[in-house]
Amino acid sequence: MISITDKVQCCGCNACGDICGYNAITFVTDMEGFWYPEIAKDKCTDCGLCEKVCPIINIKELKKNDLEKPDCYAAKHKNLEVVFDSTSGGLFSALAEKMYKEGGYVGGAIYDENFDVHHYISNSKQDLVRLRSSKYQQSNLIGFYDQVRKILKAGEKVLVCGCPCQMAALRAFLKKDHENLIIVDFICRGINSPWVNRKYRESLEKKYRSAIVWEKAKNKELGWRNLTRKFCFVDGRKVYITKDESLFNRGYLHTNAFCRPSCYSCQFKGFPRMADITLADFWRIEKVDKSMDDNLGTSLVMLNSKKGQIYYETIQQKIKSVEVPFESALAGNPALVKPLGPPKINREEFFKDLQNSDFMAVANKYFPFVPSKKQYLKKLISGYWYICKSLQFRIRPFCQFICYNFLRKNIKTNKANTGYLIPTPYTVIQIGKKANVQLNARLSVGAKKFRKSKLETRLLIDDGGTLIINGRFVFGYGSDIEVFNGGQLLIGGILGGGTNMNTTIICAERIEIGGHVMMGRNITIRDNNGGHYLSQQGYKNTRSVVIGNHVWLCEGCTIMPGVKIGDGAIVGAHAVVYANVPAYSLVLGNPAKVVQTDIFWKY
C-alpha cells in the first residue's frame, strides 16, 4: 500500500484514489493546502495497485517515448480572439478544436464556483472557454482517471492536458497506450498551493471591499510579458495586477515560497517527455523569430511522439507554425530540465503566519518589494542614460533640465525614482513660480522619432496651475500642453503612457488621465471652451475631464469638456466625444456613439 512518510514523495496526482476498488484511499489536506493519500487499513486488501499507478515510484518505467529529442515549433492560433483569451499562443485551443470536430472528448483543469481547480472532461466545445488558460494552482483529479478510462474503452477519442506528473500518472493508470488518446502536458515550474491562492483572493476582496467573480491569469490587455492577472469584482470593477505589482507572483516566481514539496525535487523534468505533445510559453521568442512576437503570447510546441507529430499536422490550417532549433526551446525555459529552487524564505514560518493573517501582510513580511543593490544600480544607470540620450548632450536642454529639476522649489521631483522633467531639444517650457508641479515619475517632453526634427513642443503651467505625474509619461514632439491658473492636470499609473505627435491638452479646471493611456497623432483634450459663453440654462465654460486606465485614443479624436471615458475604452479616429464613454466600449463618429461593447485591446 501507499505510505507517505516524506511529502516530497507525493505529487498529489490522485491516481491512487481512482485505482482503489475498495474505497480505502481518501485525501487529506494539510496546513499548506496540499492533499495526500490516507489509507483506511480496515478496507485495504494490500493489492498493491496504488503503488503501481504512482508516477514517482514508477518514474523509470514511465519515462519513455518514441522520440528522445522532440521536434520544436513556435506557434500561435490564427484567431486573435483565441490568442487574447489564452495563456500563451492558443495552441491548446487548436488541439482541442480538432478533437471536438472529430466528436472526441477534451479534458483539462477548470475553476469551480469557489475558484478551486479540478479536472473535467466532456465532448462539448462550449467547455473550451473554461478549459483554456493556466490556473496556476494544483488541480484535483479525483474520479478523472476513471472517467478517461471508461471513455476510451467505449472507443471514443480523447485529448487530455495536465501537469507532467498528472499525465505520467494517467499513463500508469491506463497501463497501456491507446491509439485514440492524445496526452498533452506543459512545462511546469512548480504548482502552487490552492489554499495560498484562496488567501490571496480573500486579501484582494478585503482590499477592494467586493467579492471576486472572475479572474484570468496572464491577461493580455497589458501585454503577455507583464504577466498580468485580471480580477473582476461583483461591484463591476476590473483590477489588473502586473508581475511588478503582484506579491503573489513575487512569492511564486522570485521566492519559490508556496509550491508543493515534491516540486523542489521534481522527477518529471528532462527527456524523453512522457506526453505526446508539450506546450509552454515561448520565452525569448523575439531572439529566435521576431515575426512570431507581438507580445500577445507565442506557444512553444514540443512533439515527443509519432502520434503527437501526426496530430499536430492536422491543425496546421488553424495555426501559424515555425520550426525552431531544439536549443532555442531550452534557452527560455530552464524549468524544462531543472526542478524548482529551494524556498528563499522560512517556508514553515510563512505558512504558520498565514494561518491567522491576511496574505498581503504576511507577504510584505517575507518577500516585500525591496530591490537588490544590483537591481537598484541597474535602474539608476538606465534612468540617467535615458536622460542623457533625451538631452542629446546639448547645452540648452541641459540647462532646462538643471533649472526645472534642481533650482525651482515649486517643482517637486522624486529623484529616487528618477522622477525628473526631461526636455528634448526644441522644447519650450514655461512654468510659473507659483505653479505646483509634482513629478513622482519621469516626464519626457518633446520625445521624437526623428532626432534632428525641429518641431517645437510646448509645456505651459501658469501660476496657480497644477501638474502631477504619477507614472512615466511622454509628451510627444509637436505637442501643446497648457495648464491655466486653477487648472489641474493629473497623469499616470504604474505602466505609464504617452502622447504622439501634435497632441493638444488645454486645462482650465481638471483633467485626469489614467495609467497606460495610449494616444494617436493630433489628439485634442480640453476641459474648457476658451472663455466663450452661451445663453443656455446650465451652461458651464469649464467641466472636468476624466480618462480612465488603459484607454486608446485614436488619431485625430477630440475629447470635449465634461467627458468621462471608462477603463479600457477605445475612441475611434476623428471621433468627437461630447458624452461619457462606457468602459470597454468602442465609440466612433461626430458626435461619438457606442458601436461595440465588451471590447478588449493590447498596445
Image (tube, rainbow, N blue to C red):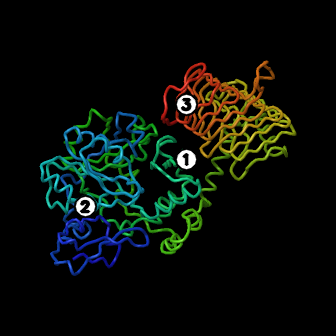
Three-letter amino acid code at disc 1? Asp
Task: Estimate the spatial distance between the alpha carbons at disc 1 and disc 3, rounded to whole Å.
Answer: 22 Å
> Residue 433, how many percent across, how many down?
87, 39
Q: Is residue 481 left or right of residue 97?
A: right
Q: Residue at x 29, y 75 (%)?
A: 38
Q: Is residue 273 left or right of residue 416?
A: left
Q: Is residue 82 among the parts visible in the rendering?
A: yes
Three-letter amino acid code at disc 2? Gly
Foreground mark, 2 or 1, reads: 1
Residue 235 numbered mark, or none? 1
Quarter of the image where the N terminus is located: bottom left
Foreground mark, 1 or 3, reads: 1
Task: Estimate the spatial distance between the alpha carbons at disc 2 and disc 1, rounded to whole Å.
Answer: 36 Å
Residue toward you, 205 or 346: 205
Three-letter amino acid code at disc 3? Ile
> Residue 7, how many percent across, how many down?
35, 74
Residue toward you, 248 or 206: 206
